[in-house]
Image (cartoon, grey):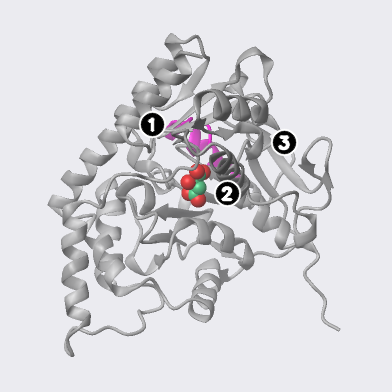
């Protein structure tokens, strides 16, 4: 008789963004006349930049010719893309990352969920609270998190690092030493960042205590301030303690195309075992690579034209962020984020819970956001809005919120 992975039964509810989608669809079906504006999930709305479309067309045509056809992609990804990433994302920033330390994938969500597989089940993880739910849920599935307390909404074997207004939404170094530390800066969901000096302290802590930092840099393209690191490898010593995850979704609009990459430096070792070898083994065994045409599109992200066009796209979303920030401030809300990140984090008014505010906003303004409590107990009383909508919808949503 087969047995299921019972860890799945420990997961409370459905995946946050699936729950929200179900609620919004139900409301939409009951109220078909209402124009719902979705500023919930961080999904982009601007079309792919022309340089990317050109690269896609060209690659599609290549695939239709005998000489240009490509079958399975190489395990780590095509060299043309890995060389470009190594040069433009790392060498240009003074970071020492070789092309063969870069693993191209179908996105940072799957990598952030899968990376835990190369670690023992009895490793203890530390996460920010609030946190992108994928980091915790995938460790629950792996049986690494102990038992769930329905009242406090915490797992017994997870170290939570509270991020709240008192610490400017930046976690403090944990007193209990974890094995794996998940960090995401600029942060999803709070939109907060830390400086390079602050990140250096995490790298030093990890090296001193034998921890691995899993650093999610999905939002680095939104950094607008000086001294905010774009990569953890800007910090000294990060090659011996950090894995970095990158996405093409937020900087280049690939949420529907799917592309990302993960860096595992060869200096990152457990005894004499390189984590690089384990991840390479996993990648080779379980994955057949992002499509050739998508990897060519990824290469175009770094071309001169591509860069210019994508900078304009990031500016477009950050203009939305500014509009949301200012509009909510005018309306008397307490808000943060939105300066180095496309997320605005606001305190719910009148002591409403996050889900109460979600319902209130949906029903009275027909605007969808994400309840802070969905990201962890310290998110309770907060709410996230994304700047990834169209400008017109963003303006309308904020005017509706102001009019409440
Ligand atoms: C979010 O809304 O937090 C993100 O879009 C989810 C994701 O990137 O998977």
Label 2 Cα neighbours within 10 Å, binned few <14 / some 14-19 / many ≥20: some
Q: Which residue is at a point 35% across and 35% down the rendered structure image? A: 223
Q: What x and y, as percent, mark residue 370?
A: 56, 35
Q: What x and y, as percent, mark residue 15?
A: 63, 51
Q: Is residue 365 left or right of residue 373?
A: left
Q: Is residue 22 left or right of residue 307?
A: right
Q: Is mark 2 within 8 Å of ligand 1?
A: no
Q: Which residue is at a point 52% across and 61% down the rendered structure image? A: 110
Q: Is residue 25 visible?
A: yes
Q: Which residue is at a point 22% across and 66% down the rendered structure image? A: 56
Label 1 Cα neighbours within 10 Å, binned few <14 / some 14-19 / many ≥20: many
Specify whether residue 197 is painted magenta: yes
Extent of the magenta region:
189-207
Q: Which residue is mark 1?
A: 340
Q: CA distance from mark 3 to mark 1?
A: 28 Å
Pick out the residue farthest to the right. Answer: 1
Pick out the residue farthest to the left. Answer: 305
Disc 2 secondary structure class? helix
């Amino acid at each position: 008789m087969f047995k299921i992975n019972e860890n799945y039964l420990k997961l409370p509810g459905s995946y946050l963004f699936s729950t929200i989608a179900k609620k919004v669809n139900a409301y939409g079906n009951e109220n078909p006349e209402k124009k719902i504006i979705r500023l919930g999930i961080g999904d982009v709305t601007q079309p792919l930049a022309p340089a990317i479309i050109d690269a896609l067309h060209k690659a599609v045509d290549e695939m239709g010719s005998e000489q240009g056809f490509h079958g399975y992609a190489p395990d780590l990804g095509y060299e043309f893309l890995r060389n470009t990433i190594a040069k433009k994302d790392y060498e240009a920033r003074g970071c020492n990352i070789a092309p063969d330390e870069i693993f191209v994938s179908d996105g940072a969500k799957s990598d952030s969920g899968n990376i835990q597989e190369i670690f023992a089940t009895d490793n203890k993880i530390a996460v920010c609270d609030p946190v992108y739910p994928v980091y915790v849920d995938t460790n629950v599935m792996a049986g690494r998190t102990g038992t769930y307390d329905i009242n406090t909404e915490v797992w017994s074997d997870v170290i939570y690092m509270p991020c709240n207004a008192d610490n400017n939404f930046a976690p403090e170094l944990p007193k209990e030493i974890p094995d794996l530390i998940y960090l995401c800066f600029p942060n999803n969901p709070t939109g907060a960042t830390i400086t390079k000096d602050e990140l250096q302290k995490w790298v030093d802590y990890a090296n001193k205590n034998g921890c691995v930092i899993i650093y999610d840099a999905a939002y680095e393209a939104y950094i607008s301030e000086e001294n905010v690191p774009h990569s953890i490898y800007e910090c000294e010593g990060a090659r011996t303690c950090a894995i970095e995850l990158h996405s093409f979704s937020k900087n280049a609009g690939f949420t529907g195309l799917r592309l990302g990459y993960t860096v595992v430096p060869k200096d990152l070792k457990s005894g004499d075992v390189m984590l690089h070898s384990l991840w390479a083994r996993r990648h080779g065994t379980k994955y057949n690579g992002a499509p050739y045409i998508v990897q060519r599109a990824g290469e175009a992200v770094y071309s001169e034209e591509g860069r210019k066009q994508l900078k304009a796209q990031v500016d477009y979303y950050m203009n939305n962020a500014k509009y949301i920030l200012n509009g909510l401030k005018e309306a008397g809300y307490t808000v943060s984020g939105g300066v180095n990140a496309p997320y605005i984090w606001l305190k719910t008014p009148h002591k409403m819970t996050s889900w109460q505010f979600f319902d209130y906003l949906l029903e009275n303004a027909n605007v969808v956001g994400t309840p802070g409590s969905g990201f962890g107990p310290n998110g309770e009383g907060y709410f996230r809005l994304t700047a990834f909508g169209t400008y017109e919808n963003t303006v309308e949503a904020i005017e509706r919120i102001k009019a409440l």
